[in-house]
Image: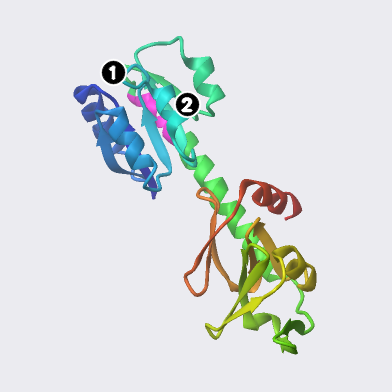
C-alpha cells in the first residue's frame, strides 16, 4: 500500500481528490492538510511515500514547502489550477502534473505511473536481497580485544556502528564489542562479499538482512534493528547488483 498525504488550501479540492483516489485501492491516504506549515511539520516527523501537492497556497507555497523539508524521500504529484509551473515541478522530480479540476481519466493514468514506480522499487529490493543472499560463505574473523585475539564466525556478527575513533561490533547473541579501531579499519577486516558498508557509520552482515525499504533508504535486520542507507552507498550498491 502506498502511503499518501494531500496538501491543498481548498477544502473542495481535497474532498474531490480523496473521493477519486478511494477508487484506486493501492493508495492509502494517511492525512490531508489545508495548511502547508502543518504539512511540513508532518513530513519532517513521519514517513510517507507520496504527496499530492498544490502550489498556490497562503503563507507558504508548494515549492517553498519542498525546500523546507528535511529529507525529500517521497514522490510528488502536483495538483494546481495553473499551467505555468510544469517545468519547475519536474525539476523537483514530480511524477506528474495535474490541472484542476482534476479529470478522472488523467488521474487514473497518474496512479498507473505511481504504481509502476513503486512496483519497480519493490522488485529492485527483492533482486538485491536475492543477490546478497547467494554470496559464498567465509572464513573466521579475528578481532583484537583487550590484548586477546577473538575469533568469530560471520553469522555471529550482526552489524558495526562507528563511534568516532572507536567502533561497536554488535553480535547475534546481543553482546557488543568495543574496539579501538575506526570503522574503516573494521571494514578492511571483514570479507566484503558478506559485509556491506551502507553508510559512513554503519556496516551490516548481509546474511542478517530481513528487508530493504528502498524508497525510504533503510534496511531492517532480522533482529528488527533499522539501519540507514545513505544515498552514496545506495547508489554504489544498486550499481554493483
Estimate how packed mark 1 is, as few (under 14), some (14 to 19) or many (20 or more) residues with alpha carbons within 10 Å: few
Task: Tell me the CA gap for discs 1 and 2.
Answer: 23 Å
124 horizontally vs 95: left or right: right
Q: Residue at x 45, y 22 (%)?
A: 97
Q: Nearer the viewer, residue 122 or 49?
A: 49
In the rendered image, residue 221, in percent from the top left (x then y), is placed at: 53, 69
Badge 2 marks a residue whose secondary structure is strand
Q: Residue at x 64, y 62 (%)?
A: 164
Rendered-image quadrant of the C terminus: bottom right
Q: Quadrant of residue 171 in the image?
A: bottom right
Q: How many marks?
A: 2
Q: Which residues are magenta?
A: 104-111
| Residue bearing the label numbered 2 | 96
| Residue bearing the label numbered 1 | 58
- 179 vs 97: above or below: below
Q: Quadrant of residue 26 in the image?
A: top left
Residue 177 belongs to magenta span = no
Amino acid at each position: 500500500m502506498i502511503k499518501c498525504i494531500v496538501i491543498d488550501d481548498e477544502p473542495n479540492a481535497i474532498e474531490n481528490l480523496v473521493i477519486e483516489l478511494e477508487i484506486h485501492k493501492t493508495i492509502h491516504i494517511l492525512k490531508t492538510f489545508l495548511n502547508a506549515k502543518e504539512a511540513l511539520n508532518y513530513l519532517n516527523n513521519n514517513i510517507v511515500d507520496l504527496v499530492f501537492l498544490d502550489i498556490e497556497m497562503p503563507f507558504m507555497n508548494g515549492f517553498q514547502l519542498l525546500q523546507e523539508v528535511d529529507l525529500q524521500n517521497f514522490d510528488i504529484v502536483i495538483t494546481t489550477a495553473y499551467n505555468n509551473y510544469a517545468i519547475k515541478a519536474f525539476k523537483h522530480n514530480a511524477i506528474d502534473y495535474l490541472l484542476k479540476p482534476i479529470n478522472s481519466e488523467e488521474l487514473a493514468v497518474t496512479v498507473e505511473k505511481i504504481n509502476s514506480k513503486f512496483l519497480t522499487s519493490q522488485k529492485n529490493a527483492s533482486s538485491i536481497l536475492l543477490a546478497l543472499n547467494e554470496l559464498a560463505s567465509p572464513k573466521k574473523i579475528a578481532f583484537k580485544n583487550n590484548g586477546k585475539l577473538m575469533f568469530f564466525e560471520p553469522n555471529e556478527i550482526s552489524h558495526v556502528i562507528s563511534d568516532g575513533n572507536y567502533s561497536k561490533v554488535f553480535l547475534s547473541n546481543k553482546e557488543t564489542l568495543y574496539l579501538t579501531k575506526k570503522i574503516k579499519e573494521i571494514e578492511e577486516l571483514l570479507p566484503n562479499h558478506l559485509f556491506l558498508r551502507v553508510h559512513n557509520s554503519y556496516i551490516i552482515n548481509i546474511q542478517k538482512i530481513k528487508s530493504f525499504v528502498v524508497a525510504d533508504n533503510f534496511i531492517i535486520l532480522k533482529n528488527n534493528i533499522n539501519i540507514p542507507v545513505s544515498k552514496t552507498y545506495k547508489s554504489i550498491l544498486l550499481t554493483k547488483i
